[in-house]
Image: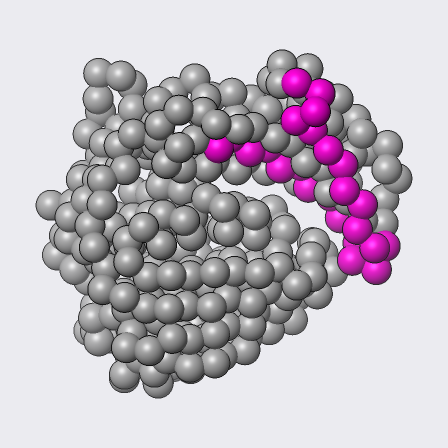
Amino acid sequence: MIEIDGSEGEGGGQVVRNACALSLVTGTPFRIVNVRGGREKPGLMRQHVTAIEAACAVGGAACEGLTVGSAEFVFRPARVTPGEYHSAVGTAGSTGLVLQTVLMPLAMAAVPSRLVLEGGTHNMMAPPFDFIARTFLPVINRMGPTVTARLVRHGFYPRGGGRIKVDIAPAPLRAIDCTDRGALIGRSGLAVFAGIPPGVADREIATARRALDWPEDAFAVRELPESQGPGNILLLEAAFEHVTEVVSGFGKLGVSAERVAQTAAARMAGYLASDAFAGPYLADQLLLPFALTGAGAFTTVKPSRHSLTAAAVIERFLGRRCDFNHMPSGTHLLQIR
């Protein structure tokens, strides 16, 4: 059994999700102590419990200590069984992070699966649905499986209530090289809001346009039914030949629309100024599938603590190192050893 200290490295929920996914793929049980020990409120939160429950259902796993607030749990996998699964976080906890936990085990199974996930689809500290659908999954599909995701209903923090459907057609994973993102072919900005004054979205768009100097017709505003709010997200997208980067800014009480847009625009400008294939969040998501192939490479900006922590967990289960090498261009090249 693999023993993991959840307070090491980044000390968050990613350790939990990656450990569950790797355990299902390898059949190796594990124990985590000091769960989310690096967080202000340590222990399992509702969304982590839901993700582990989903992993238990998919892999016939037995789990001890699976309660909200638990600082330690044990996970013993059985056999991954593809099929139809439904998971509801019950709060605005991220549906995308639940998906991250079970995607690769199901993508490597023998027959297709369908997931229906309910909870948050656009909330802080997690990849929004748009990032998953347009940035992450297209790379996974290049690796062999075919994964499609559909947004049924938006779910903003704190209400949640979102719903996504994911269809997974498995295939053997193949190693790919993602070191060239190709030419820029499109860019856009979209401010989505529900149950808040429309002027907030207008100000976000005006600020982002000034900061990025993109043409006026690259931006748009979308209002959702009030029942799906209150909520607001600014999505900035840069499409290249081989990858699409989606940067998000979340509206938050007490934070001006201008500040939300300025922060998102600065992140997008930083990505555009580099020649990296993967932004920091895509790099986090790609480590697991790339490590499972045992080969392949991608370029990214400076690796985050999330990425370095994920790499450490991967090495414990697979015995494979995820090495980030600083390149003369300023990017970092990820290679699996």
Q: Quadrant of residue 192?
A: top right
In the picture, the quarter occupied by the C terminus is top left
Residue 126 magenta-drawn? Answer: no
- Residue 235 forms part of the magenta stretch: yes
Q: From the viewer's perspective, is residue 298 above or below residue 287? A: above
Task: Indicate the position of residue 187 as horizontal and vertical percent values.
Answer: 56, 28
The answer to which of 25 and 239 lies nearer the viewer is 239
Q: Image point 61% across, 30% down: which residue? A: 188
- Specify the quadrant that holds the N terminus: bottom left
Which residue is painted at 21% across and 22% down in the image?
A: 327
> Which colouring convention does the figure follow?
one colour
**Residue 89 position in % (x across, y down):** 59, 69
Asked whether, in this view, residue 234 is left or right of residue 43, the answer is right
Examine the rendering and report whether any part of residue 34 can be seen. Answer: no
- The answer to whether residue 325 is left or right of residue 145 is left
State the residue in front, 290 or 319: 290
Which residue occupies 46% across, 44% down? Answer: 135
Report the magenta residues as a range.
215-239
Q: Position of residue 150 (x, y in %)?
A: 57, 61
* Quarter assignment of residue 324: top left
Residue at (75, 48) in percent of width and height: 231
x and y, in percent, of residue 47 in the image: 54, 65
Q: Quadrant of residue 236?
A: top right
Q: Against 250, is 315 above or below?
A: below
With 125 as the anchor, is 199 left or right in this view?
right
Residue 185: in sight, yes or no? Answer: yes
